[in-house]
Image: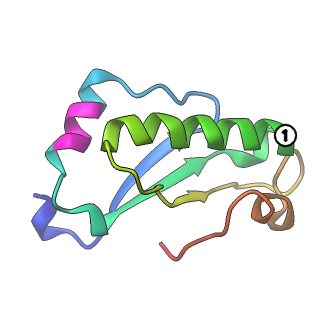
Amino acid sequence: MAERVDRIILLFDAHKLDISDEFRRTIHAMRGYDEKIRIVLNKADMIDHQQLMRVYGALMWSLGKVFNTPEVCSISISSNSSSSGCGSSSCCSRVVNFPEI
């Protein structure tokens, strides 16, 4: 199925970063389609800047083990609100550059 899509979005919740065995097997099944994969850290507006930096680092570390590659994955950050936490794009942009999805 991966050969028929333009993008593969792996969505992670900022409060729950664990990668289950089933999800790990799914990611491994998508090998060869790395150029289509985009990783999104969702609900960034629910945590403050310092927590976001920790969560981002933990996600990078976890994904490095799953993808088993020396190059760092590009992670986009998603937030739906600007009322709290890291909802402003200027706060989040200090943590990571936003690639095009």
Label 1 is placed on what type of residue?
Gln
7 over 92 or under it: above or below: below
Q: Main secondary structure of the magenta part?
A: helix
Label 1: which secondary element: helix
The picture places residue 77, in percent across and down from the top left corner, at 63, 56
Q: Residue at x 63, y 56 (%)?
A: 78
> In this figure, which residue is indicated by the disc labeled 1?
50
Q: Is residue 50 rendered to the left or right of residue 58?
A: right
Residue 65 picture quarter: top left
- Specify few, some or many for label 1: CA neighbours under 10 Å numbering under 14, 14-19, or 20 or more: few
The picture places residue 85, in percent across and down from the top left corner, at 86, 45
The picture places residue 67, in percent across and down from the top left corner, at 32, 44
Q: Is residue 66 rendered to the left or right of residue 3?
A: right
- The residues colored magenta run 24-28
Q: Residue at x 29, y 69 (%)?
A: 35
For the N terminus, the image quarter is bottom left
Question: Is residue 13 visible to the viewer in this orientation of the structure?
Answer: yes
Q: Residue at x 84, y 45 (%)?
A: 49
Question: Is residue 48 visible to the viewer in this orientation of the structure?
Answer: no
